Amino acid sequence: MSAPATSALRGMALAKSFRSGRVETRVLQGLSLDIAPGELTLVEGPSGCGKSTLLALLGGLLRPDSGTVQALGVDLWALRPRELERFRLEHTGFVFQGFNLFGALTAVEQVMLPLGYLGLSAAEARTRAQEALAEVGIEDRAQLRPAELSGGEKQRVAIARALAKRPQLLFADEPTSALDAANGQRVIDILHNIARRHGSAVLCVSHDPRLISHGDRVLLMEDGRILTDQRPAPPIRTMPLETPPDTPLLTRLREETAE
Ligand SMILES: Nc1ncnc2c1ncn2[C@@H]1O[C@H](COP(=O)(O)OP(=O)(O)O)[C@@H](O)[C@H]1O
Ligand SMILES: [Mg+2]
């Protein structure tokens, strides 16, 4: 069965367990979901519910025990390791909580690095890297190294690095967790704009309930399952991160965030 045109990414009956010693943790037991292009899809849930595992399976970083992932119509886990690596390089971008920048490289060099692997010339890579830095609003920081950048700026460099490849699939794992509210807001707005402007499917997983009103679509996850799948009313973009109304799960998420 091929995925419909409205699906950029589809997980079907995904299962994953981890074993350490004699203890087996079943994280996902047959989870299915579809992610559309041109949208920011948020998966929200408490720590340990399986968000990072889900993102890693969908992004081609971690092989599921069973189930399939169709990414841009390709059966991801049927690819050979080399092909999978190539697919990830060409079509996916990743943004993580810890930024993952190289201490010795300037911002523009960080963004240029994957473009070199894609076969762009140094001049092309530099132009594209500068465009990506401009898109996230830090073109004036291009020559600075991570130690000279704020947390919010570092995360924007990491987003520019993912964005410069022009990936159709962009994955973000807790991209705002190390940031204050204003910078978190900025990062989520940038991810939203990338989905709209470039038509990419952007999947962001987070335990931060402040993000909820900022997704085009929000999936609430608990114990490896999707509990609800909703499209919140669009927030007024100039407002600070809003506090969503109370539900038991959101109350727990809020308590965790406050820790
Ligand atoms: N590599 C691993 N080895 C063993 N257990 C793991 C591993 N990765 C995740 N887990 C366990 O799987 C569960 C889900 O983890 P994770 O997907 O990271 O959740 P979340 O991102 O929602 O916090 C947790 O109980 C975690 O301890
Ligand atoms: Mg996680």
Image: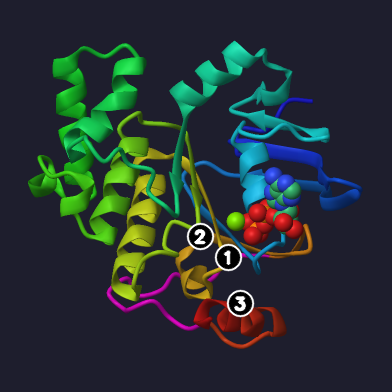
How far apart in space, not on screen, are marks 1 and 3 (Cα)? 19 Å
Residue 231 circle label: 1
The reply to whether dot 1 and dot 3 touch (C-beta < 8 Å) is no
Q: Does the magenta stretch include residue 230?
A: yes
Position of residue 64 in the picture relative to residue 210 (left or right): right
Gap between marks 2 and 3 measured at Cα: 20 Å
Q: How many marks?
A: 3
Majority SS type along the magenta span: loop
- Asked if residue 103 can be seen in this view, the reply is yes
Upstream in sequence: badge 2 or badge 3: 2
Q: Do the residues labelled 1 and 2 touch (CB within 8 Å)?
A: yes
Along the line of sight, the residue nearer the viewer: 209 or 235: 209
Residue shown at 62% from the left, 88% from the top: 246
The quarter of the rendered structure image containing the N terminus is top right
| Residue at the spot of label 3 | 253
Q: Residue at x 36, y 66 (%)?
A: 179
Residue occupying image coordinates x 39% and y 55%: 192
Q: Name the residue under label 2.
A: 216
- Rendering coords of residue 195 (x, y %): 41, 46
Up the image or down, 31 lies above or below 63; here it is below
Up-down relation of residue 52 to residue 76 (above or below): below
Tell me the kind of residue under disc 1: Arg
Image check: 148 left or right of 113? Answer: left
Q: Residue at x 37, y 37 (%)?
A: 162
Q: Give the range drawn in magenta.
A: 229-243
| Helix, strand or loop status at disc 1 | loop
Mark 1 nearby-residue class (10 Å; few <14, some 14–19, many ≥20): some
3D distance between C-alphas at marks 1 and 2 = 6 Å
Q: Mark 3 falls on what kind of element? A: helix
